[in-house]
Image (tube, helix red, strand yellow):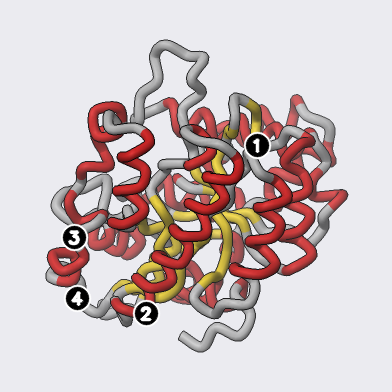
Amino acid sequence: MTVTAIDVFAHVLPPKFYQEMLQLEPRLPQMYPFITQPLLSDLVKRQQYFDGQINQVISNVNLNPEDYTTPDKALALCRQGNDELAELVLANQPMFLKAIAMLPLNNISGALELLTTQIAPRKEFCGIQLFTRALGKSIADESFYPVFAKAHELGIPIWLHPIFDERKPDNNIVFSWEYELTQAMYDLVKSELFTKLPQIKIIVHHAGGMVPYFAERIAHILPPKQASDFKRFYVDTAILGNPKALELAVAYYGADHVLFGTDAPLGIAPAGAGQALLAALDETDLSLEVREKILHENFEKMIVGDQT
């Protein structure tokens, strides 16, 4: 069937920002080969794969200035990178719908400033991206709580993306990231984040990692409040297909908490898993009403005033 979909988790690598990062660490392409995917930066070529069917909400691929430079420089790079993300949205409509902004977590006061003065006022942004770990600590560490609190105050949703835990020698992008997402969710639940910030909205990449599969372990082992808080997260569909796994995610989180996301242009060559995920949703036993919620209505409801 013909559908309109909003991909809430599509990635880019803003060219000017990338060049600044290469000045800090020239080995980045060797360290993280996935960033060499040409469609992350070559948006002329990326437009060739845009069929008008899937609009993308873009976020920077996981290169974090705080890992490579001083707090002041990280703040400047995030500010510059966010400006470039906004420019990419304006220059590439309707393919790009909105952007997810970056924050420097080695500069919390600067991050709060960006949230207030750069991100909240600009219509190009609809959220911020945080990662499962930062500066060698869980994202649930109390030092990062002011960022969550300010996002909650401003009504800005949080996109949660995995990164490797550098303490581990066997990291891999098939399984490690799904574990890291799951552990970060557990840490956030244990921190009582949803009690402290009851209106916080967190969208977890890769359908919430391992959580739906281990729903009964969560329900039987954790205290009831913690178990129920796992269902407060929102998740995307970025698992490259798999209709039954998509059904499981919807059954666990609920139809109102699952949003279409693909990880484009990564995952399936040449331009991502958009068509594979549309086909997978069509193969599920989910009703048309539920699929429409996933494809675009849940995002539109979350982002107040979005008229797409």
Rounded to the nearest angstrom, the CA distance separating label 4 from label 1 is 37 Å
Of the image marks 2 and 3, the number of the one nearer the N terminus:
3
Residue most extreme to the right? 196
Verify CB contact (< 8 Å) between mark 2 and mark 1: no
Q: Type of residue at label 4?
A: Asp
Query: At numbered mark 2, what does the secondary structure look like: helix, strand or loop?
Result: helix
Q: Residues within 10 Å of mark 4 (few under 14, many from 20)?
A: few
Query: At numbered mark 4, what does the secondary structure look like: helix, strand or loop?
Result: loop
Q: Nearer the viewer, mark 4 or mark 1?
A: 1
Which residue lies under the disc numbered 3? 42
Residue most extreme to the top? 169
Q: Residue at x 21, y 65 (%)?
A: 43
Residues 290 and 80: in front is 80
Along the horizontal axis of the image, is 248 left or right of 110? left
Q: Residues within 10 Å of mark 2 (few under 14, many from 20)?
A: some
Along the horizontal axis of the image, is 221 left or right of 104? right
Instruction: Please indicate, yes or no, whether residue 14 appears anywhere in the rendered image.
Output: yes
Residues 24 and 229: in front is 24
Q: Nearer the viewer, mark 2 or mark 4?
A: 2
Verify CB contact (< 8 Å) between mark 2 and mark 4: no
Which residue lies under the disc numbered 2? 90
Rounded to the nearest angstrom, the CA distance separating label 2 from label 3 is 16 Å
Q: Position of residue 24 (x, y in %)?
A: 38, 36
Rounded to the nearest angstrom, the CA distance separating label 3 from label 4 is 17 Å
Instruction: Please indicate, yes or no, whether residue 287 appears anywhere in the rendered image.
Output: no
Q: Which mark is residue 51?
A: 4
Q: Residue at x 46, y 52 (%)?
A: 247
What is the count of numbered marks?
A: 4
Residues 221 and 230: in front is 230
Rounded to the nearest angstrom, the CA distance separating label 1 from label 3 is 31 Å
Of the image marks 1 and 3, the number of the one nearer the N terminus:
3
